[in-house]
């Protein structure tokens, strides 16, 4: 049975992708900071799903996750922070907030990749990191978040070149009806976005098709 590790899996795209992979026959290790939401979500899956709550910026938690998957087919770096809200202009961006956001959105995904690469190499596995159009577009207020996602994209680009036995992708899923989007743009606008389940199905196809490493938008997914 194929094994996936998904971060930020208690809600939103992480949970939707977990459900889609489980329906496709995958075994799952799920993690998120919110212990109650995570274990509640995992309980609904039943057999073949393990949950370990914790913060991906904590090295001890990263080590626990890696130890739990000595063989791994897919790492999904989905856990992400938005940063200060209301979204501030760069002229006013709190630098402490940016440092914390870099830890969550850039350093933690790399730490997880480093910790799980031995397991991924064994199985010819893949790393999927969730990016954003804010990584390539100049949107007022999105400078801090976008900068972290641009850095994540570049980490994926270089990792794909350095690890030819592991497929490495970053995906811009577009706007989705999630709590994070609601925090950024308001409940009304977020409610008009498509649900994360539509993107999750496309991501399962991506993993199955296993294209060469690269960056994809929702419309480019196989």
Image (cartoon, grey):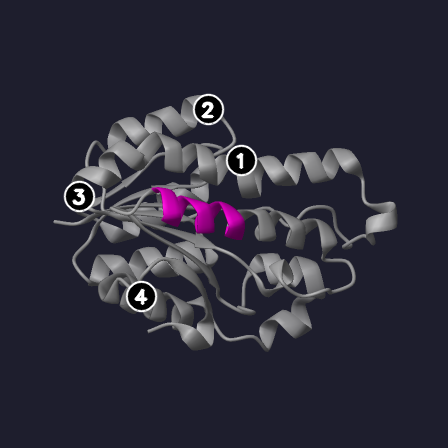
**67 relative position to 184: left or right:** left
First along the sequence among labels 1 and 3: 1
Q: Is residue 78 visible?
A: no
Q: Crowding at label 2, few (<14), some or many (≥20) Cα neighbours within 10 Å?
A: some
Frontmost residue, 81 versus 212: 212
For the residues marked 4 and 3, what is the alpha-carbon distance in whole angstroms?
A: 17 Å
For the residues marked 4 and 2, what is the alpha-carbon distance in whole angstroms?
A: 29 Å
Identify which residue is drawn at 67% across, 73% down.
188
State which mark lies toward you, 2 or 1.
1
Question: Would you say the residues marked 4 and 3 are in contact, meaning their CB atoms lie under 8 Å apart?
Answer: no
Could you tell me which secondary element the residue under label 3 belongs to? helix
Q: Is residue 19 visible?
A: yes
Residue pointed to by mark 1: 107
Residue span colored magenta: 153-162
Residue pointed to by mark 2: 59
Instruction: Relative to 125, say whether 220 is above or below.
Output: below
Identify which residue is drawn at 87% across, 49% down.
91
Tag shown at residue 206 = 4
Residue pointed to by mark 3: 123
For the residues marked 2 and 1, what is the alpha-carbon distance in whole angstroms?
A: 11 Å
For the residues marked 1 and 4, what is the alpha-carbon distance in whole angstroms?
A: 25 Å
């Amino acid at each position: 049975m194929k094994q996936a590790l998904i971060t930020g899996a208690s809600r939103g795209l992480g949970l939707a992708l977990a459900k889609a992979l489980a329906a496709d026959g995958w075994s799952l290790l799920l993690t998120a900071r919110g212990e109650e939401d995570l274990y509640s979500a995992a309980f609904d899956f039943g057999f073949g799903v393990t949950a370990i709550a914790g913060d991906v910026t904590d090295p001890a938690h990263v080590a626990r996750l890696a130890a739990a998957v000595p063989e791994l087919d897919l790492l999904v770096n989905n856990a992400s922070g938005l940063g200060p809200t209301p979204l501030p202009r760069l002229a006013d961006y709190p630098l402490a907030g940016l440092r914390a956001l870099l830890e969550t959105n850039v350093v933690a995904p790399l730490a997880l990749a480093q910790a799980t690469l031995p397991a991924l190499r064994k199985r010819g596995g893949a790393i999927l990191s969730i990016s954003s159009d804010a990584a390539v577009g100049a949107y007022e207020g999105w400078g801090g978040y976008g900068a972290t996602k641009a850095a994540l994209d570049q980490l994926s680009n270089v990792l794909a070149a350095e690890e030819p036995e592991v497929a490495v992708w970053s995906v811009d899923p577009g706007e989705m009806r999630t709590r994070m989007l609601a925090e950024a743009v308001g409940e009304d606008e977020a409610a008009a976005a498509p649900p994360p389940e539509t993107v999750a199905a496309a991501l399962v196809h991506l993993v199955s098709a296993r294209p060469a490493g690269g960056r994809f938008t929702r419309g480019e997914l196989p």
